[in-house]
Image: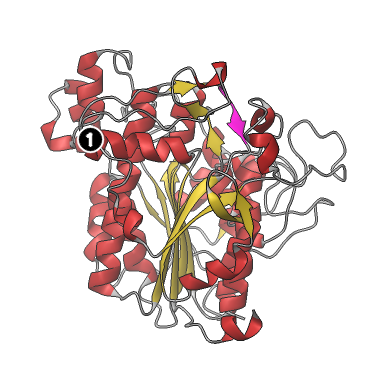
Amino acid sequence: MLFAFEAQATPKNIIIMITDGCGDNCFKAATLYQYGEYEGQIYDLFPIKLHSSSNLAVSVSGQNRHALVPPYATEKVWSDFKYVMDRLPCSAACATQMATGIKTYYGAVGVDLDTNNLENINEFAVKKGKSTGVVTTVNWSDGTPAGFSAHWPTRKNLEAVSKSMLCDSKLNVIIGCGHPFYDNNGRHRNIPNYTRVGSERIWNDFTHNRPTIDGKPVSDIDGDGKPDAWTFLESKDDFVKLITMPNPPKRVIGTVQVAATLQLSRDLPDEENEAFKQAILTLPEENTDSLLATVTQTLPSLDTLALGALNVLKQNPNGFLVMIEGGAVDWGAHDNFKGRMLAEQISFNRAVETVVRWIETNSSWDETMLVVTSDHETGYITAPNQAEDISTWHELPYTKKGEMPKLQFNSTHHTCSLVPLYAKGSGSECFNIFADETDTRYGRYIQNTEIAQLIFMLWR
């Protein structure tokens, strides 16, 4: 194994794209809507197509952080319908595992079972002279970006998590939502809510590009011994300009002018309403709904945020590592809102296409590795009526392109189901070395901790 690994190429850049809460059937449902087939996405053509286990060391039900959860058991998953609902993962812990290579407990942010800080792949990349960043469609202090950049015993303390990301990390880019002066529709509000950015003091300091945040110096990323303040961006124009800026700021903290997320939480008719379905699932320029048109005109897409981040990070001749998240698929699945969930996944799919074009235009597959995956599954999505007979597991029924897929939610929570993992580019073939476990339905899979373990090995 070691000899085979040593023979592989080493990537200059690594891009990890995560669609939060999106399991196998969510991937398939969005593709059915877009193409009328189970496959059709650009990542379906990637040479590496595996699955990943989101199993934690300790699940939400664990009272003792050392009472470890048993490993994923394929024979129980496909014989006991409720099995995957009994071992719940979470985004922060899954992100920590993907970023550190160590199993941890429910709610952990960058720490082990004893709450000791764990080195993450962004911190490791900085040691190698590379630039790093996190991008998301939800608040940038949320579980996934936090797990890749912060250290705190619980994700619930957003003030501590925000401060850890802004002061302790050496990230070059943090981009997401959570703007205190805008509501979920991207409309200005007079009474601010600072919860998602930590506090009013934190907000005032980083939006004014100060070298200290709430009394704590930000990190020095260029080695001159001085704190390197963040450059604050917020408007759609800010993010569009960032894409082509010849000399972008070395550090960017982008907070989009919306409260929770780019689109899922906005006010629209019920998701079963046909007008809603047409509005939510068409390209922005085709929308006729007035509120949706307003939102899409004033808010950037995940494509835009990703391209802006890549323009900042590519300035480093040593390369970069970035995590780009479609964060609200999970939210739609929690609420069992099929239309909103699929809209988020389709938006993520378009962002993947954009990143692939960026690689082929600005880099190459010989120097960049792209990983597309999820942190965990949400909603326990199956074919209709699957729970009534598990003697045979069914695929989602075929539907025509543009028709809402037929599916059933069986939960409003996360599950420990396997999730897809796709990879392409320099070093990606090494995932085959780690895929030494087999599921009776999905085939070969890795542990999500092995994503970080592979990166540590590639850049050792």
Q: Is residue 440 above or below residue 8?
A: above
Within-10-Å neighbours for mark 1: few <14, some 14–19, many 20+: some
Pick the quarter of the image with the N terminus: bottom right
Work out whether residue 233 can be spotted. yes
In the image, what residue occupies the spot 71% across and 41% down? 154
Q: Residue at horizontal 31%, vertical 51%? A: 351
Q: Is residue 192 visible?
A: no
Residue 338 spot, x, y in % from top left? 38, 24
Spot the residue most to the front: 391
Q: Position of residue 453 (x, y in %)?
A: 64, 67
Residue on which the image places disc 1? 296
State whether residue 125 is above or below residue 264. below
Give yes or no for residue 28 being in the magenta stretch. no
The answer to which of 169 and 443 lies nearer the viewer is 443
Q: Position of residue 173 (x, y in %)?
A: 44, 60
In this rendering, the answer to whether 183 lies above or below 388 is: below
What is the magenta range? Answer: 411-415
* Callout 1 amino acid: Thr
